[in-house]
Image (tube, grey):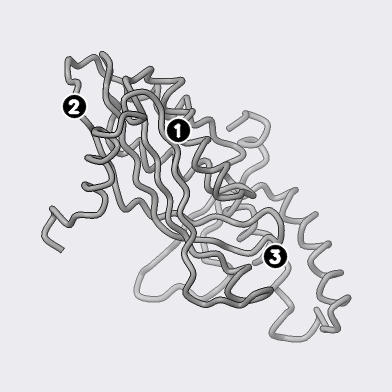
């Protein structure tokens, strides 16, 4: 995140202006200049759809939506390759490392409506491993942008391949798209699956092992 963005950010002590209960206090960083500009646009949108932005229920909605939008797109301020490089370790391990069932929340760039699901990411080290928490972090860094599922899948794969230089990378994402469920064709239970592979995972045997592992429930659930 650039120093200019950090300088303009403030700490919010309350969750979207709602009353603090049970001692809970949420603290988020927002760019106050961006919030103000976005809020003005959202007020105009409310008017254009026939609402009254001054009525009680909507009075603070433009600011709340502005904060939500800034959070949902904060991936633009993150460098996923830097996230991986921050926790790379030399290790002579050349078997598959798999992090599966990573929750994914993103927004379709065509309608700006959410899509959500799970990502399964594997790589075969070639001299370096990475802290396991960094894999979900880079998934989130790419997902918290306006996206299409196909590009999201490839970006995760390329980030790991370019940074770690492993023997291979595999990424599968399964997601439901609200633009299909809420509008358009309105198919409620459809799931879209995308995949991308490099190196060793292009081989049938290794790819089959990966597919088997992401479909199994070895953790007992």
| Vertical comparison of 87 with 63: above or below | above
CA distance for labels 2 and 1: 17 Å
Q: Position of residue 82 (x, y in %)?
A: 47, 25
The residue drawn where x is 31% and y is 39% is 133
Label 2: state its secondary structure.
Answer: loop
Q: Which residue is mark 2?
A: 95
Mark 3 residue crowding within 10 angstroms, few (<14) / some (14–19) / many (20+)? many
Q: Position of residue 91 (x, y in %)?
A: 19, 16
Q: Earlier in the sequence, mark 2 or mark 1?
A: 2
Q: Position of residue 15 (x, y in %)?
A: 52, 66
Along the viewing direction, whichever of 40 and 108 lies nearer the viewer: 108
Along the viewing direction, whichever of 38 and 73 lies nearer the viewer: 73
**With 68 as the anchor, is 54 left or right in this view?**
right
Q: Earlier in the sequence, mark 1 or mark 3?
A: 3
| Vertical comparison of 150 with 181: above or below | above
Tell me where residue 174 sits by quadrant.
Answer: bottom left
| Vertical comparison of 161 with 113: above or below | above
The residue drawn where x is 60% and y is 70% is 180
Q: Nearer the viewer, mark 1 or mark 3?
A: 1
Badge 1 vs badge 3, beta-carbon distance below 8 Å: no
Q: Nearer the viewer, mark 2 or mark 3?
A: 2
Numbered label attached to residue 31? none
Mark 2 residue crowding within 10 angstroms, few (<14) / some (14–19) / many (20+)? few
Label 3: state its secondary structure.
Answer: helix
Mark 1 residue crowding within 10 angstroms, few (<14) / some (14–19) / many (20+)? many
Label 1: state its secondary structure.
Answer: helix
CA distance for labels 2 and 3: 49 Å
Q: Which residue is mark 3?
A: 63
Q: Which residue is mark 1?
A: 157
């Amino acid at each position: 995140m650039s120093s200019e963005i950090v300088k303009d950010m403030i700490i919010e002590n309350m969750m979207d202006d709602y009353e603090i209960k049970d001692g809970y206090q949420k603290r988020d960083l927002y760019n106050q200049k961006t919030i103000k500009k976005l809020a003005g646009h959202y007020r105009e949108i409310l008017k254009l759809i026939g609402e009254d932005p001054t009525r009680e229920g909507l009075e603070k909605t433009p600011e709340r939506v502005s904060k939500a939008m800034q959070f949902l797109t904060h991936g633009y301020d993150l460098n996923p390759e830097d996230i991986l490089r921050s926790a790379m370790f030399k290790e002579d391990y050349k078997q598959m490392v798999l992090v599966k069932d990573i929750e994914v929340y993103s927004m379709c760039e065509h309608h700006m409506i959410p899509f959500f699901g799970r990502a399964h990411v594997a790589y075969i080290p070639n001299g370096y491993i990475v802290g396991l928490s960094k894999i979900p972090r880079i998934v989130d860094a790419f997902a918290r942008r306006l996206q299409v599922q196909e590009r999201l899948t490839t970006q995760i794969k390329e980030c790991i391949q370019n940074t770690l230089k492993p023997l291979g990378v595999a990424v599968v994402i399964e997601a439901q798209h609200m633009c299909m469920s809420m509008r358009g064709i309105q198919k409620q239970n459809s799931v879209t699956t995308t995949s991308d592979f490099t190196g060793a995972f292009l081989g049938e045997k290794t790819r089959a092992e990966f597919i088997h592992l992401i479909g199994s429930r070895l953790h007992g659930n």
